[in-house]
Amino acid sequence: MSGYTTSEMMTVAAARRLNNGAVCFVGIGLPSTAANLARLTHAPGVVLIYESGPIGAKPTVLPLSIGDGELSETADTVVSTPEIFRYWLQSGRIDVGFLGAAQIDRFANINTTVIGPYAKPRTRLPGAGGAPEIAANAKEVFIIVRHSPRAFVSKLDFITSVGYLDGGDARSRLGLPGKGPMAVITDLCTMEPDPLSKELTVTSIHSGVTRAQIQKATAWRVRFAAAVPETPVPRAAELKALRDLQARTAAAHGTTLAASD
Amino acid sequence: MAQIIILREAVAHLIHDGDTIALEGFTHLIPFAAGHEIVRQGRKNLSLVRMTPDLIYDQLIGAGCASKLKFSWGGNPGVGSLHRLRDAVENGWPHELMLEEHSHADMANAYVAGAANLPFTVLRGYAGSDLPKHNHNIRAIRCPFTGEELAATPAIRPDVTVIHAQRADRAGNVLLWGILGVQKEAALAARRLIVTVEEIVDSLDAPPNACILPQWTVTAVCAVPGGAFPSYAQGFYERDNRFYLAWDVIARNRETFQSWIKRHILDTSDFNDFKRVYSESSGHPSMRPR
């Protein structure tokens, strides 16, 4: 037994990406869990901003929705939704946008809108929310998503939020303010864009995971970096902070919702 | 000037078939009681506007009140899908629903433009996204000063906006606090404004920069304690996450949805009656106090 789950490994690996003091625009669910784990471990000074309006939120339990009272009660200030998007995101004040995804392609474009044709979708997904402008305007973007061939697809049915479009200099030609996705953290590995082609490339593999497993969970032919180290395993203090956070959340909400795992 | 009336009268007099209506509240202060009353009075052909349709519009869509939805994120927050919204989009049940889909930033901007009585809003957004290909109300505009290409969207001007707030005074001045979402903008963008409140008090006693809607901007104020349930009202009660989870099961199936709507909304006389029936059917009180 390894002593931790693949989900815990993913959350810890994502949390480590956040530097102390970074101003981070956080999506609900996995991104929020990872960002709060960072705040409770190595990055106590990280500033968490949620699109519902809280700036500098310091929740003691994880929010189950984007606008939980816990966020506004622990924030430095709470502003309106227009202000969050206009003064804080569009203005370029966000260091890191932390996103999830239903589908992602090899250039880190994201689909959260539809599976199938737009006019007659097989599956109607929730839609854009704040993600298109976060993906465009945050200085850097991290994406956290579970690895499966249904999520890591060769062609998106719909581009909701842009990564590097069809690669190379396509994103910079669009003139988007932010640099784009700098890492995709999954339950199997970490992928980063190739400096030139911008194709997602495996740069570290979680302990116990094989290259074949990653390929099997990815619909395109996966590229691996020249040297692919093993992701450092979660430390005891990281696991304790994460498990305590999830236990507090379960106790407070009387339930364990999917969004917090 | 605000009239203080009961919710049934406000909906009967101010919301008509075919109206464009915005029931706003970003997770917090969602005006569920007003949504129920619209279903109860059988409004049809409504054009719904709301950033996050949430359970409140899932109920209106499933009950057949809506012909159009303008939105930016349509899920059950923290749980998953809005099954009635999906059934309408994927299968046309109970009838076709026209979608107009934006991003949050754009919708928020469009409310600001409506409140400011401007025809449209500009946004640095959507570049590279497929959304403008499917929405003719997202267009490109060039800045006359810098030449930068930006996205433009028409202002939102609802016939009626409905919001829920914590408090009003006896003249109808309204005070809300906590997560404010786009309520102030949606309120000022509308031709008619209905506000349901937790309580009506003698004096608001609010600090100078509090979010207050002066009574002369409000058409009707209705006292509906608990009227945001199962969302929450900061200072009054918490979000009922059990309800959001239970809704996933209720709304997944057309028959269970219809019997829930019949028992809890169509066969109840008002929101107090709903709370009574909900306590019976769920086995727990409808509000968890803070």
Image (cartoon, rainbow, N blue to C red):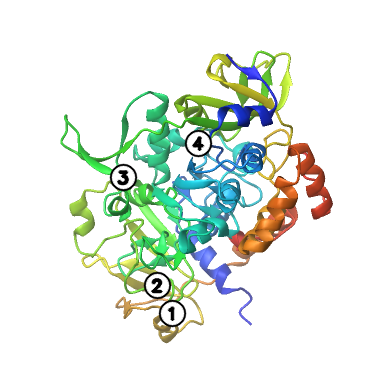
Image: A63 above or below A247: above
Kindly check if marks 2 and 4 are in contact, taking CB atoms under 8 A apart as contact: no
Residue bearing mark 2: A152
User: Do the residues at pointers 4 and 3 share their chain?
Assistant: yes
The quarter of the picture where the N terminus of chain B appears is top right
The amino acid marked with disc number 3 is Gly
User: Within 10 Å of the Cα at label 2, are there few (<14), some (14-19), or many (20+) other Cα atoms?
Assistant: many
Image: A218 above or below B246: below
Q: x%, y% of residue A121? A: 41, 65
Dot 4 or dot 3, earlier in sequence: 4
The amino acid marked with disc number 1 is Ala
**Nearer the camera: disc 2 or disc 4:** 4
Chain ID of residue with mark 3: B
Chain ID of residue with mark 2: A
Between B267 and A49, the residue placed more toward the observer is: B267
Residue bearing mark 4: B21
Chain ID of residue with mark 1: A
Q: CA distance from mark 2 to mark 4?
A: 39 Å
User: Within 10 Å of the Cα at label 4, are there few (<14), some (14-19), or many (20+) other Cα atoms?
Assistant: many
Kindly tell me whether residue A109 is visible in this rendering. Answer: yes
Q: CA distance from mark 2 to mark 3?
A: 25 Å
The amino acid marked with disc number 4 is Ile
Please name the residue shown 39% across and 82% down the image: A215
Residue A217: image tag: 1
The amino acid marked with disc number 2 is Phe
